[in-house]
Image (cartoon, coloured by chain):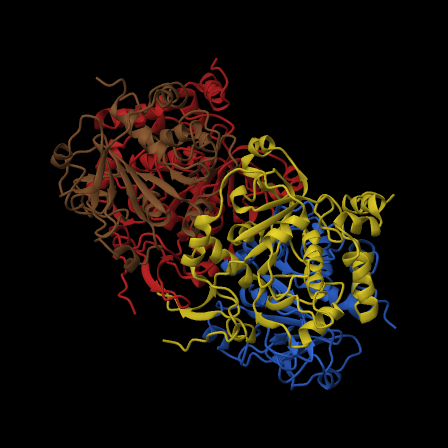
Chain colours: A blue, B brown, C yellow, D red
Amino acid sequence: MPDYNAMELMICIAARLLEDGSTLGVGTGAPCAAAMLAQKTHAPSLFVAFEAGGLAPLLPSMPISVGDSRTFYKGLMATSMCDIMEACQRGMVDYTFLGGAQIDMYGNLNSTVIGPHGKPAVRFPGSGGANDFASLCWRTMVLTQHDKRRFVAKLDFLTSPGFLTGPGAREAAGLPKDTGPYKVITDLAVMGFHAESKRMQVESLHPGVTFEQVQANTGFELLKAARVTDSEPPRPNELRILRDEVDPYRYVIGR
Amino acid sequence: MPDYNAMELMICIAARLLEDGSTLGVGTGAPCAAAMLAQKTHAPSLFVAFEAGGLAPLLPSMPISVGDSRTFYKGLMATSMCDIMEACQRGMVDYTFLGGAQIDMYGNLNSTVIGPHGKPAVRFPGSGGANDFASLCWRTMVLTQHDKRRFVAKLDFLTSPGFLTGPGAREAAGLPKDTGPYKVITDLAVMGFHAESKRMQVESLHPGVTFEQVQANTGFELLKAARVTDSEPPRPNELRILRDEVDPYRYVIGR
Amino acid sequence: MPELTSGLGPLFTDPDPDAARAFFREKPRALINKVMSVKDAVAKLIHDGDYLASGGFGVNRISTAVLHEILRQRRRNLGFAGHTTTHDFEIMCAGNLDGEKLLARVDASYIVGLEARGLSPHARRVMQSGEVDVCEWSNYALACRFRAAVTGVPFVPIRSMLGTDTLKRSAGKEIVCPFTGKKLVAIPALYPDVSFIHVHECDAYGNCRIKGITVADVDLARCSKRLIITTERIVSNEEIRNTPYWTTIPSFCVDAVCEVPYGSYPGNMPGEYFSDEAHLREWLEVEKDLDAFRAFLKKYIYDVPDFDSYLRLCGGVEKMKQLRAKELLLPSA
Amino acid sequence: MPELTSGLGPLFTDPDPDAARAFFREKPRALINKVMSVKDAVAKLIHDGDYLASGGFGVNRISTAVLHEILRQRRRNLGFAGHTTTHDFEIMCAGNLDGEKLLARVDASYIVGLEARGLSPHARRVMQSGEVDVCEWSNYALACRFRAAVTGVPFVPIRSMLGTDTLKRSAGKEIVCPFTGKKLVAIPALYPDVSFIHVHECDAYGNCRIKGITVADVDLARCSKRLIITTERIVSNEEIRNTPYWTTIPSFCVDAVCEVPYGSYPGNMPGEYFSDEAHLREWLEVEKDLDAFRAFLKKYIYDVPDFDSYLRLCGGVEKMKQLRAKELLLPSA
């Protein structure tokens, strides 16, 4: 038995992908934990931007809301949603982390409805800032549980853009050049997107997980990267910081 | 001999046109003196807005620049040019005072060039905020000296819109409904605009001035209002306040 | 010329800037005392059928007192801008119960959820019933609807929503840029009939200061036809005038000033008090059962005369001291 | 479909947001010490042929030190955003003398004048010679060019300039609103190569506070590819972080931080010092005669090594004390 859980692994992998001195648009929960962990390890000057207006806080604890006072506690600036989103649209925000009820092979996300829009079987919150971040930040990362209910062949509603219908579709739709999904980090594997086909491909498998197992939990055909590696487990110092400093009450990692 | 000069008369007439509780976009000089006089007589809650961002200051003295610190001294807000201009575009600003090197019968103004644009005989500053105020405030007032060099049949350059080419032209151009020139106050007379033809018409004559004299100083045919009145000279309390409180160093009224 | 998509979603309000200008021309600008009770402000300014918008960010710096009063005065057939609405949306949805319909139309960018706290069972019930007309937006797009309205133009262009069902279910329209030939989405102006914004301090005329993120409120205040300010405290006009560059909302936008200390409770108010997570959990819990929810609403909202009474029911001064300690990162009493 | 006018004026910069995004993608964001001299900042960041923009409002809160240094380093063939440029424009025009051409292109909304002080004889000389390409705008239109660039869209629509020669000599284009059918003017985005903004205080990373009107500087800071901040004083990062809602420009926009006390002299700096009207009058006076002007520029700019030396020539600490007393409405010493 490993001495860490799936969420801890996901957060550590996500944190490592964030470069020092880069900018990140995030929400609460696991993405925020990943950002805090990155800041406390290799990326002390990672600029975290919250869509409600908080910029680069010294987070004393995990925010409960994207707009609560923690999101600008000792921040460099407390500003407006438009100021943050304009920075994204201008090309100043490198990464974002999103989630969703459904994701497809092109990294498109649904967080709006299951069933018909006018009278849905399930109503979710909607885009919030997700569509904006997915449209305007350079690289979109997704953190989610891996199961067939989420990884679907066809979304009930395309809330936030991945590669849409495939190669060239983002550009044809008018979205900013060279943007799009980058990584999908789940409890089973890390996936990226094939350079030409823009389809989701498995890039690394978590300890003890096989490609077949990932495919079995996915509602569409997954590609395999040219080289599929083993996901690196959490390092001792990552786990220590994550548990002692980032999320001592185990709000996110406790599940 | 009257106990006041032409500038004092113009400022007093301009001040009386400003209603209490209205909003006014102004520059420096005579318009600012008129606004201060109005505040100190009948319109204590006249909101003065300066295009650089000053809103509703308690002016300790006449500003030298539309952006100097006097323009927001003990103001209600010190904001941005866009915030002020957006208020104009939204319909929140009632009056503006403008000037210019040339004015025509429809109240159009030139403050850009005399001669060809590429290599002008005289280069003036250009629009500044004048085109915006003339386009977006409800009522435009002009304060200017009255002579044939200024009141011309054809402008060298149409910097800021009056009624453009006449009835319906502002609407056809796309300018906001029901806006346009309201009064032109000179050292000879007060002019308004004919309701149908939108042409400049004399509405009141200053003491001792005849219509013929005004026409002789105007490069286009002036209309006469149905009833041409006598301009009311400065009242003693207006003169006292103007001289003692508004412009004690006679920067504006001294000429 | 590329093919252009127009959203199929309903436009609940008129984006015509000349219609808005005609309204704003008549809006009073004078410096007059606008202090009144929340009860009077809601009675005077919010009418059945109005389109409303809430300041702050769902459960942070919200005008809870106004939201409760709208329930108490039983307004009906309202429109609402769901711009990251969380607890505010939850309260509005409480008016859609037993065949009553407080909420009839919503521009949705974020609704029914309370972020990390989970989804509101009753808000989902309401939104899954089909009884509320919905138009979808992203948060930025909805913020830009206010931005266009503030600017007095019928639309502003943006580059998000392109290629998605969010655009198709919005009322945005794709256009082609005359300079670059690029596709953009034209986002129509939204002028709410009434907005309510909670601030840290303002004077009796309504000149306001917000000490923290402003979310969309600088714009929302300016584009709303009528505006109710609730404030932690009223300060003198002299104090406002001493630092005019701290004013975030000028008085000529404001119709009512209501002094409501702890007015964002159970939400967070930056620098003042943190959210009451236990009470917010209680809301989510009781909503699961309609009888329990009815009893809860009766106890906390319909049977109390005002917001102060609600605060007393929720723990009064002792609770507020705890939330203040939590906000300021002090050891809790 | 109404007939649509397109301005004939030249577009000096590329409004394409994807080209700008490619630049901003590479712009460093890290929190690093950016403190340097004005001399080094100009040498490093401003190149011949660049398009420049100046913060503040002509003679209020301007970066005089940067403007002088541009003259001293004899930059050539520059573009300039003439957004109520007064004394700043006058200094730029001083580089167009004796066949030298510092200024080659200008987007003009307000140039050659110094407001109530009158017109600059030399700036008029330069602008009447035909040697500078001009594109006309209104002040708001030019501010909206920054606004569009900040927003990362190729244009924003406005309702001024319509029907005038100002529009015809601009690079704006009339468009039809897809919602209302109304005519609007599309104002193209302007991304300056370099801007310089004078602020009250900032930290070593460039997080800035402006204590007064911001004019167009909140936007200008964000849309400029490179940004030089001059500041009355440098404060600690801790101080900035204590009240993040006072930050007007975030450090990730900033490339250089130069501490220049009295840096807006001879202009006004709100709350710090008033303008030196006598010195500004001297500028206007000497410009009438080219020999006198050459001697004046030699004495005050070309023959001094830096801005401190200029301040000493202009009366040094004694003069600064007088201007401070004037600003604060104290009886002058």
Task: Name which residue lies at 19% across and 44% down.
Answer: B104
In this view, the residue farthest toward the top is: D333
In the rendered image, the vertical position of residue B194 relative to residue A204, given as above or below: above
Task: Name which residue lies at 43% across and 53% down.
Answer: C21
In the rendered image, the vertical position of residue D15 relative to residue C201, given as above or below: below
Residue D288, image quadrant: top left
Q: Position of residue D116 (x, y in %)?
A: 32, 30
Q: Quadrant of the N terminus of chain D?
A: bottom left
Q: Is any part of residue C48 visible from this angle?
A: yes
> With C275 as the anchor, is D80 left or right in this view?
left
> With A198 as the anchor, is A100 left or right in this view?
right
Task: Name which residue lies at 48% across and 68% down.
Answer: A177
Q: Where is residue B109 in the image (x, y as percent from the top left)?
A: 24, 44
Total number of numbered discs in the rendering: 0
In the rendered image, the vertical position of residue C208 relative to residue D154, given as above or below: above
Q: Is any part of residue A54 visible from this angle?
A: no
**Residue nearest the viewer, comparing C308 with A215:** C308
> With B177 as the anchor, is C122 left or right in this view?
right
Q: Position of residue D47 (x, y in %)?
A: 38, 46
**Residue nearest the viewer, comparing B96 with C75:** C75
Residue A161, image quadrant: bottom right
**Residue nearest the viewer, comparing A156 with C171:** C171
Residue A210, image quadrant: bottom right
Q: Where is residue C200 in the image (x, y as percent from the top left)?
A: 66, 43
